[in-house]
Image: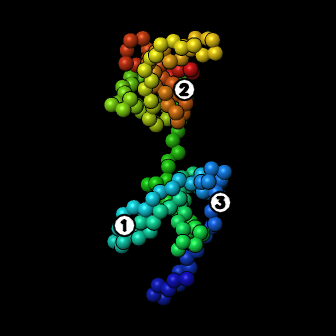
Amino acid sequence: MAVCGREVLVMEMAIYPLEKNKKNHFICPKCRRDLHFVSGGAVRIVAGRADMSAVLPKYECRHCGIYFQEVLGSGLFSEHDLPKAAKPAAKKIRSTGDLPPTELHRDVNNHCVCPRCGELMDYIEGQPVRLVDGKPDMDNVKDHFHCSHCESMFRRIANTHYFQWSEK
């Protein structure tokens, strides 16, 4: 309980002993997904005051939009909301029927923004035909883009810079 002038503010803090999974990673007590470790950073100025909690390491659950910090080396972790900028925005994946042929260009790292979900796609250069289980594998013969986020594949249309979504 904190007293501020005449007002009494009651501050509730949830404290958890975090569990580990079989891979020895901490898991979120709410959604049971792996927590992402973020090492401590520099001191931040928030509302004109130094925020010392930024220098402490934390475990983030991006799914729930919360993070956990250890309380005084006790093995117990306090729960806090992630800043709004750190919360992932739910991106809408466009229907494949709504995707017209699109001009795509790779950058210096062989990436391009996916027209379907907005994440980065990988550019895969054409390769010779390979035998897989005694059968020719024709999937990677032509240049194409692959998005690991929405599992989309965009194949080149003839000899143009235009690409079309493809099932395989």
Compute the Cα span from label 3 to label 1: 29 Å
The residue nearer to you, when weighing 47 against 62, is: 62
Q: Secondary structure at mark 3?
A: strand
Colouring chosen for the image of the structure? rainbow
Indicate whether 140 appears above or below 18: above
User: Which label was assigned to residue 19?
Assistant: 3
Amino acid type of the residue that numbered disc 1 sits on in the rendered structure: Val
Indicate whether 141 appears above or below 148: above
On-image quarter of the C terminus: top right
Horizontally, is 160 left or right of 63 in the view?
A: left
Amino acid type of the residue that numbered disc 2 sits on in the rendered structure: Thr
User: Which label was assigned to residue 43?
Assistant: 1
Residue at position x 52%, y 74% from top?
A: 72
Indicate whether 81 appears above or below 52: above
Horizontally, is 50 left or right of 90 in the view?
A: left
Task: Decide: few, some or many residues near mark 3? Use Cα within 10 Å; few <14, some 14-19, many ≥20.
Answer: few
Task: Decide: few, some or many residues near mark 2? Use Cα within 10 Å; few <14, some 14-19, many ≥20.
Answer: some
Badge 2 or badge 3: first in the primary sequence: 3
**Which residue is most to the bottom?**
6
Q: Nearer the viewer, mark 2 or mark 1?
A: 1
Residue 32 screen position, x and y as percent:
65, 53
Residue 122 screen position, x and y as percent:
44, 30
The residue nearer to you, when weighing 36 against 167, is: 36
- Residue tagged by mark 2? 96
